[in-house]
């Protein structure tokens, strides 16, 4: 079971753009086999048996699968749940995934699991807690995972480093890869006044194993607007621009189109994937011409 | 503030009443930037995705309750349940255990005394839906078992099997919810139900009390011989041949390799 961390540039042998496998698309994906390279699932939706596991197994015979977890709560102070890891390991045996990932965020405190990807202060204490849980996860699974940069709606006054540096440091200390969510970078730039291009420039390119693209929503808040990572609409032009910049910098990194609410027709997801593929391929050609 | 303290206080504020977001203690508020947009507005986004999101997810497990009380009533009840009993796992598939007991103590629902039992049925259906896959015992498997050893056999129900008992006609009420119209059913009737998932779809089977009794003993790991004797003592003339024909065809028990 080699290659749990996405292999880079020309070394992977599949179409680099994937979409999410979600319930409304199960049968259509099996019937029509849309032209995408791989499918992403949240493993938590496939814990237990029954219909979802049945379809996942069937679909995994036709597409590579990426397990993108949302429930490990890697940024919690307490250790990652062994029961949760056991269930992910069970799915790894079922679908032999091309990647396993979760987020640089927290969800659980005490006995409560808030089932959201919550913000962390960027300091040494947090970095140590996050890295302990990434280490535990990688040790338990026996391979490197990817961790994703978050969207957040509050910002800490006493951050000791910027978010991009925090992500680099986590990857450096644990050997994990980075899953760079371009929409999240855009959301951070709007909510916290960052320069998103500078964020991408700070990220260490060799750590990036996957990228995500998604839509977001602007929510009125008092006299201002909070940009919320809702995954319920097409990728915005500003995010495509950032993605082009990221591809130019990181190369042909496997990319996911995320859509988790208000599901559109499958054709719309496939069209978004096609757009991402065109950017990946054109930028790769540009890079190889430059190398000549 | 240490990370552990921040996470605990954040959790407590989010799971508190909505008004708590407007009056966050200064020692917590001072941790964050809030120059352009108030902290309460920022925290509302989290409260909406956490309490609102989990409650919406919970409602999906209870479509029959929704048919009975409407979405607004159910969602309000679900929100209060989330605040009082937040999930303990990063997987929400089975979240909602205890919702039936919560409804029993929820004053606005006291006029609908059958509601907690209906919630118990939907919890059982949800657990059956996500139960681990397993193989069913067939008549052929059972026939191959040495007859002299059958009495000591502990016949295990499938992972999805749940037994439901109610003072109300839950099956009739369910049918009414699924196809509303006509006269509401007479609810005051004791009902015994078997919930299970033979393959991918959840099935609900109405039981005689004797069947419920015998299945209950088997579910409690009583050996076949002892369960049969206890059932016969209470229900003279209980027909085990008919019972096994019915419940083997419903794929109620685990394959023999899982039984002892």
Image (cartoon, coloured by chain):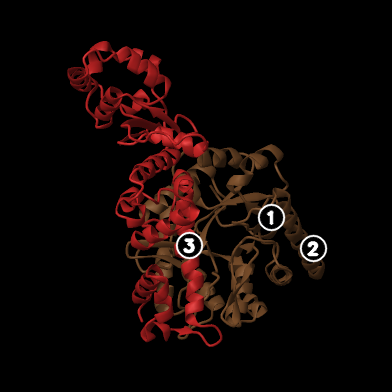
Residue A282: which disc? 2
Query: Would you say residue B128 is visible in this rendering?
Result: yes
Q: In which quarter of the view is residue B190 placed?
A: top left
The residue that appears at 60% across and 67% down in the rendered structure is A180
Of A14 and B191, which appears nearest the observer?
B191
Chain under numbered label 1: A
Q: Position of residue B125 (x, y in %)?
A: 42, 39
Looking at the rendered image, the disc whose residue lies closer to the viewer, 1 or 3, is: 3
Residue furthest to the front in view is B183
Real-space Cα distance between discs 2 and 1?
A: 13 Å
Q: Position of residue A83 (x, y in %)?
A: 37, 51
Query: Crowding at label 1, few (<14), some or many (≥20) Cα neighbours within 10 Å?
Result: many
1 and 3 marks in contact (CB < 8 Å): no
Of A110 and A89, which appears nearest the observer?
A110
Residue occupied by mark 3 = B52
Residues indicated by labels 2 and 1 sit on the same polypeptide chain: yes
Chain under numbered label 3: B
Say which element carries label 1. Answer: loop
Q: Position of residue A59 (x, y in %)?
A: 60, 41
Residues indicated by labels 3 and 2 sit on the same polypeptide chain: no
Query: Would you say residue A104 is visible in this rendering?
Result: no
A94 is higher (above) or lower (below) than A243: above
The residue that appears at 53% across and 75% down in the rendered structure is A153
Q: Position of residue A128 (x, y in %)?
A: 40, 73
Say which element carries label 2. Answer: helix
The residue that appears at 70% across and 57% down in the rendered structure is A10
Q: Colour of chain B?
A: red
Chain under numbered label 2: A
Residue occupied by mark 1 = A16
Real-space Cα distance between discs 1 and 3?
A: 35 Å
Chain whose colour in the figure is brown: A
């Amino acid at each position: 079971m080699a290659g749990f961390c996405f292999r880079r540039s020309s070394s992977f042998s599949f179409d680099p753009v994937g979409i999410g496998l979600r319930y409304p698309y199960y049968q259509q994906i099996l019937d029509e086999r849309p032209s995408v390279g791989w499918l992403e699932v949240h493993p938590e939706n496939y814990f237990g048996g029954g219909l979802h596991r049945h379809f996942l197994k069937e679909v995994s015979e036709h597409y590579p699968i990426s397990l993108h977890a949302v429930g490990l709560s890697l940024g919690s102070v307490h250790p990652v749940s062994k029961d949760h890891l056991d269930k992910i390991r069970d799915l790894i045996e079922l679908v032999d995934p091309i990647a396993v990932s979760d987020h640089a965020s927290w969800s659980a405190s005490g006995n409560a699991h808030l089932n959201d990807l919550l913000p962390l202060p960027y300091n040494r204490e947090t970095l140590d807690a996050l890295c302990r849980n990434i280490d535990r996860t990688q040790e338990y699974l026996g391979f490197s995972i990817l961790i994703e940069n978050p969207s957040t709606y509050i910002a800490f006054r006493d951050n000791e480093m910027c978010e991009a540096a925090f992500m680099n440091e986590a990857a450096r200390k644990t050997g994990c890869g980075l899953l760079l969510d371009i929409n999240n970078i855009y959301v951070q730039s709007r909510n916290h006044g960052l320069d998103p291009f500078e964020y991408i420039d700070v990220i260490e390119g060799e750590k990036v194993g996957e990228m995500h693209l998604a839509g977001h929503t602007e929510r009125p808040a008092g006299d201002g607007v909070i940009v919320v990572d809702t995954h319920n609409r097409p990728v915005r032009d500003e995010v495509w621009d950032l993605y082009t910049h990221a591809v130019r910098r990181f190369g042909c990194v496997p990319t996911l189109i995320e859509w988790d609410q208000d599901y559109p027709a499958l054709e719309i997801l496939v069209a978004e994937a096609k757009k991402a593929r065109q950017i990946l391929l054109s930028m790769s050609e540009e890079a190889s011409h430059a190398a000549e | 503030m240490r990370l552990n303290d921040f996470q605990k206080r954040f959790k407590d504020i989010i799971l508190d009443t909505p008004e708590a977001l407007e009056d966050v203690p200064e020692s917590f508020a001072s941790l964050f930037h809030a120059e352009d947009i108030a902290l309460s507005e920022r925290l509302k986004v989290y409260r909406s995705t956490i309490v609102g999101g989990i409650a919406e997810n919970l409602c999906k497990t209870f479509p029959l309750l929704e048919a009975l009380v409407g979405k607004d009533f159910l969602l309000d009840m679900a929100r209060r349940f989330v605040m009082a009993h937040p999930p303990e796992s990063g997987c929400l598939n089975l979240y909602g255990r205890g919702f039936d007991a919560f409804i029993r103590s929820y004053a606005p629902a006291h006029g609908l005394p059958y509601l907690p039992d209906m919630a118990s049925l939907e919890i059982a259906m949800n657990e059956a839906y996500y139960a681990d896959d397993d193989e069913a015992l067939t008549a052929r498997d059972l026939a191959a078992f040495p007859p002299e050893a059958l009495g000591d056999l502990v016949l295990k129900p499938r992972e999805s099997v749940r037994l439901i008992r109610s003072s109300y006609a839950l099956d009739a009420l369910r049918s009414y919810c699924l196809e509303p119209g006509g006269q509401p059913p007479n609810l005051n009737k004791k009902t015994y139900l078997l919930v299970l998932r033979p393959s991918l779809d959840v099935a609900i089977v109405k039981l005689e009390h004797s069947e419920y009794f015998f299945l209950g003993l088997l579910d409690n790991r009583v050996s076949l011989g002892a369960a049969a004797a206890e059932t016969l003592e209470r229900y003279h003339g209980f027909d085990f041949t008919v019972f096994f024909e019915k419940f083997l065809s419903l794929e109620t028990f685990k394959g023999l390799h899982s039984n002892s």
